[in-house]
Amino acid sequence: MTIIDPTVVYRGLDFRTVERLAEYLRENGVHALVSVPDPRCAQTIPMFETHHEILATNFDEENVRELIEKWQAGAKGESISPSCEADLFCYHCGESLASPTPTCPACNQTLD
């Protein structure tokens, strides 16, 4: 059955993980977007308890379920897609880093 309305297909606490899964779904033909919580929620809900959601449209429910299971299996040690691997990045500006470094080459901020 093809679902055409925006539907939550995944919820998670870690934004980067949710973002990687959404990218994996898009790479496999699913129209998936990460729903970012309203910033006003930060005043009432602690950030670490915020659930990030992946919304999808025009997808086959069974296909998405299988893709999520494959991705989760890959996250447990099997390599599914290079995009699922942990990337190094500057948490100040978001610049990708080729290797661990004490300062970001893009914004010159100190990295811990």
Image (tube, rainbow, N blue to C red):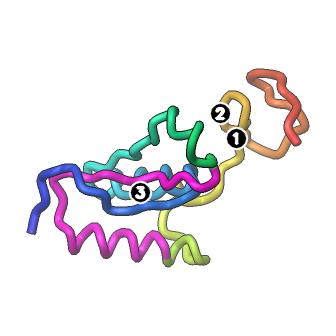
* Magenta segment: 48-72
Amino acid at the residue labelled 2: Gly
Mark 3 → mark 2, Cα distance in angstroms = 19 Å
- Residue 81, horizontal then vertical, whole percent: 49, 62
Mark 3 → mark 1, Cα distance in angstroms = 19 Å
Query: Which of the two labelled residues, at mark 3 and mark 1, occupies the earlier sequence position?
Result: 3
Which residue was labeled with disc 1?
Answer: 89
Give the position of the C terminus as an image quadrant. top right
Residue 94: image tag: 2
Q: Is residue 54 magenta?
A: yes
Crowd around label 2: few <14 · some 14–19 · many ≥20 (10 Å): few
Amino acid at the residue labelled 3: Tyr
**Mark 3, secondary structure of its residue:** helix
Q: Is residue 18 magenta?
A: no
77 lies above or below 10: below
Contact between marks 2 and 1 (CB within 8 A): the answer is yes
Q: Residue at x 51, y 33 (%)?
A: 39
Which residue was labeled with disc 3?
Answer: 24
Contact between marks 3 and 1 (CB within 8 A): the answer is no
Residue 10: image tag: none
Query: Which of the two labelled residues, at mark 3 and mark 2, occupies the earlier sequence position?
Result: 3
Residue closer to the observer: 59 or 7: 7
Amino acid at the residue labelled 1: Phe
- Residue 96, horizontal then vertical, whole percent: 66, 37
Say left or right for 29 vs 77: left
Q: Residue at x 73, y 42 (%)?
A: 98
- Residue 74, horizontal then vertical, whole percent: 52, 73
Q: Quadrant of residue 36?
A: top left
